[in-house]
Image (tube, rainbow, N blue to C red):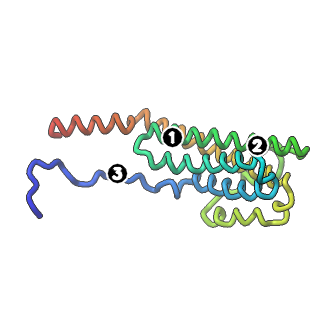
């Protein structure tokens, strides 16, 4: 290997890759499930030519995609911002489900409802999440908009809770460690000082 004069330490930065990545995050996995189920709900119960159909599909997509995009940002500040956009899109989507139930004179399950408690008690692992999209084909969901909409509302509320916790963790990290630009500047100063 040729001798490289005056090169800084080229050993890899142990923090260059932020494992485990978005695909392993529960907030991403749950957002993907919500997106899949939302698409099936909209195709079954919302007129495909309506603006509401498009809005609901796009809100679910935006929620999921902003988690992906944020996790790929080098800037922690940008990651936090995009997770906030994801969170807001989920609230928009849950409001569409509330509207659907109200306009169709279907009940919104209270958080104390036994069915909501049962859904919230589920602890997701990879096998559970892989099988959930098939729930949309079960007779009790496929033909029951009340159950399907309330399932989605419960899942979205769970997702929002997880996103809030994740955002809080990232905000604390930003306060403790600083952001990408700040840390890059520190590294530049250290390089110039020969540290």
Give the x, y percent position of residue 36. Answer: 68, 58
- Vertical arrangement, residue 53 with respect to residue 174, above or below: below
Instruction: Name, please, the residue furthest toward the front.
Output: 49
Q: From mark 1 to mark 3, how far is it between C-alphas?
A: 20 Å
Q: From mark 2 to mark 3, how far is it between C-alphas?
A: 40 Å
Residue at which label 2 appears = 96
Which numbered circle lies on residue 169? 1
Q: Residue at the spot x=15%, y=39% of the render?
A: 194
Q: Indicate the secondary structure of the residue bearing disc 1.
A: helix
Q: Name the residue nearer the viewer: 16 or 36.
A: 36
Q: Residue at the spot x=66%, y=43% of the render?
A: 90
Q: Is residue 61 left or right of residue 51?
A: left
Q: Going from the N terminus, do you reach mark 2 or mark 3 first?
A: 3
- Image quarter of residue 179: top left
Q: Is residue 131 left or right of residue 47?
A: left
Image quadrant occupied by the N terminus:
bottom left
Crowding near pointer 3: few (<14 within 10 Å), some, many (20+)?
A: few
Q: Residue at the spot x=70%, y=45% of the render?
A: 55
Crowding near pointer 2: few (<14 within 10 Å), some, many (20+)?
A: some
Marks 2, 1: nearer the viewer: 2
Give the x, y percent position of residue 167. Answer: 54, 40
């Amino acid at each position: 290997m040729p001798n490289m004069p005056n090169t800084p330490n080229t050993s890899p930065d142990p923090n260059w890759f932020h494992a485990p990545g978005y695909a392993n995050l529960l907030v991403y996995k749950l957002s993907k499930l919500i997106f899949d189920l939302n698409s099936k709900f909209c195709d079954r119960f919302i007129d495909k030519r309506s603006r509401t159909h498009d809005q609901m599909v796009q809100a679910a997509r935006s929620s999921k995609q902003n988690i992906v995009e944020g996790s790929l940002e080098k800037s922690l500040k940008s990651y936090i911002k995009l997770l906030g956009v994801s969170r807001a899109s989920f609230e928009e989507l849950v409001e569409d489900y509330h509207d659907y139930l109200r306009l169709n004179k279907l009940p919104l399950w209270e958080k104390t409802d036994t069915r909501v408690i049962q859904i919230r008690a589920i602890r997701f692992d990879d096998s559970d999440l892989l099988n959930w999209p098939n729930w949309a084909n079960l007779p009790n969901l496929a033909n029951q908009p009340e159950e399907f909409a309330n399932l989605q509302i419960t899942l979205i509320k769970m997702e929002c809770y997880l996103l809030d916790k994740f955002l809080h963790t990232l905000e604390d990290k930003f306060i403790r460690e600083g952001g990408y630009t700040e840390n890059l500047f520190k590294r530049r100063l250290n390089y110039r000082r020969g540290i």
